[in-house]
Image (spheres, rainbow, N blue to C red):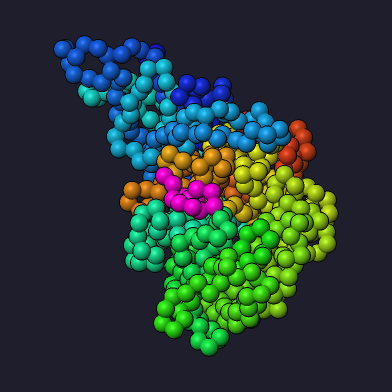
Amino acid sequence: MDYDVRIISSMEKVLPLGGMQNSRLVKRIIGFLGQRVSFQAAYCFHGDYYLNQTLKQAFRNPYAHVKAEGDFPGKVTIRKVDCVPVFMPHEKQNKKYDSEYIGHEAGLYPDILSPFEDGVQVVLEQWRALWIDCEIPEDLKGGDYTVSLIFSDDEGMVLAQTEVTIHVVPASLPKQKFLHTEWFYPDCLADYYGVEVYSEEHWNMIEAYLRLAFERGINVAYTPILTPALDTLIGKDRTTVQLVKIKMTEGRFEFDFGLLRRWIRLCREIGFEFFEMAHLFAQWGAKYPPKVMAEVDGKSEKIFGWHTPVESCGYDKFLAEFLPELVKELKELGVFDNTIFHVSDEPTIYNADTYQKALQMVEPYLEGAKIIDALSHLDLYEKGIVKNPVPTNDSIHQFLDAGLKNGWVYYCCGQGYKVSNRYIAMPGWRTRILGAQLYKYKIEGFLHWGYNFYNCQYSLHTIDPYRINDGEDAFPAGDPFIVYPGADGKPVESMRLPVMEDAMNDMRLLEYLESLTSREHVLDLIDDYGNLDLRFDEYPSGCDYLQDLWETAAKEVEELIK
């Protein structure tokens, strides 16, 4: 057969020359009312180049029109899976990577979900893929529906046709209770697109990026009350995106929360209920305040930053005025109880003293608030310095063994060995396994630092995310962002984002099944299917486990609600 088209899982990644790693074909997908289910169509041409241009003009590799038909009544969206250049698939040190990657060397790897217009070039002996989303209507009757993909030539002759059955369970998944934050950087949008910060054009972009995040299960909005003191070279600054305007007169401060009110109003209109305030101290030890801009004698000045060490600059007095006013504003807006605060990102045992001093500066003004920070040093938790830690997923079992309950977890550039992550060079199932792990260990929230970090390491300059996805040789490819900047000021999804949403949906399904049976029943299901004690660093390889777990849990729910 010249035209080879196969329906495969959304957890697969199709390499141009490597194919699909021999995974099973998908014939049936189970979904719930209101859910968006996804699959891929991998395609390849096994014929020959067209050379007779005197007979008829035609592409050397055939062009195929592609359309979706069938009795599925919901919206069906087709996108191309485009490859990106990857120079750093993972870190190269011992125990920084393992064998479960789709590649270990620089090359082209699939990631971008590009808009689809009409058809595709079907390339000789080179595999490519389409991404298909099927949106199940809220009021659809349960049962089986068919989606057929038809590849045809200019004359309408069918070149290849394949189909998948969408089985609809007549129920909706419960609302996502789990908290998921991906740090969002409005400064990266302003810098990349070249627009004025908080101009109407910028606000439109902010809305588009936040709306997509919420649609994909990111339900905590990282809020830049001050310009985020993250991944910034000491002595340098990121573009100011401070939402709170400050005026300093004779050593006293006035605060204008107008922009913050607009931000929170926008987020709530989108659907966000939870908020996360930007860090109150700089990264790596809380030795400096973040950049704070204020109007002084009619001029904008940087009153705090790298030039003002915390212990001697009066930042404590600023916080004593700022935080009570911020808390008052958040309470008036009705969001304080659902707001998370940070002191400083990734403290270690080597700077525990400065972190503790910083914490003591803010705690008196944040009574009743939840303060969390990412870290990997157990000592900080055991000594009570960080009461609500967010451990890395390769260290979390130490924290669980030490008594951590209902905690958070995160991963970033350093978690590439035997644990879940979302690097471009990782298979999708390794990203999605996170959901079952979070459910089993009763994790309350997940944090990642890069929704749209379009800078090089230390934010020295803006990069082109379509060419550079590693912060300029700093991080494994894909770590800094999970969406690409579209030409129209709207985000373009990577294939990793919907897979992360699937991980959140796995949690929702398992919670649903628990509500109808018991937690013990669901835990038995999780471990029995993998024939192991599922851990963050031990889990089944391949798509089959997660496909079978989803199908079995969904079928049990369907039977129990009849």
Location of residue 83 in the rendering, given as x and y in whole percent from the top left corner: 44, 33
User: What predominant SS class does the magenta segment belong to?
Assistant: loop
Residue at x 66%, y 42% (from the top left corner): 415
Is 536 drawn above or below residue 181 in the view shown? above
Q: Is residue 409 magenta?
A: no
Location of residue 204 in the rendering, given as x and y in whole percent from the top left corner: 36, 61
Locate the N terminus by quadrant.
top left
Q: Is residue 4 left or right of residue 348?
A: left
Q: Nearer the viewer, residue 201 or 535?
A: 201
Q: Nearer the viewer, residue 366 or 473?
A: 473
Asked if residue 442 shows in the view, the reply is no
Q: How many marks?
A: 0
Name, please, the residue furthest toward the left: 54
Location of residue 34 in the rendering, given as x and y in whole percent from the top left corner: 48, 51
Q: Nearer the viewer, residue 129 or 494?
A: 494
Q: Nearer the viewer, residue 55 or 36?
A: 55
Is 481 drawn above or below residue 238 in the view shown? above
Q: Report the span colored magenta.
A: 452-464
Is 558 drawn above or below residue 69 in the view shown? below
Residue at x 37%, y 48% (from the top left corner): 486
Q: Is residue 212 left or right of residue 274?
A: left
Residue at x 66%, y 58% (from the top left corner): 284
Q: In which image quadrant can residue 430 be found?
A: top right
Asked if residue 313 shows in the view, the reply is yes
Q: Is residue 76 left or right of residue 223?
A: left
Residue at x 56%, y 34% (from the top left corner): 89
Location of residue 77 in the rendering, given as x and y in whole percent from the top left corner: 38, 41
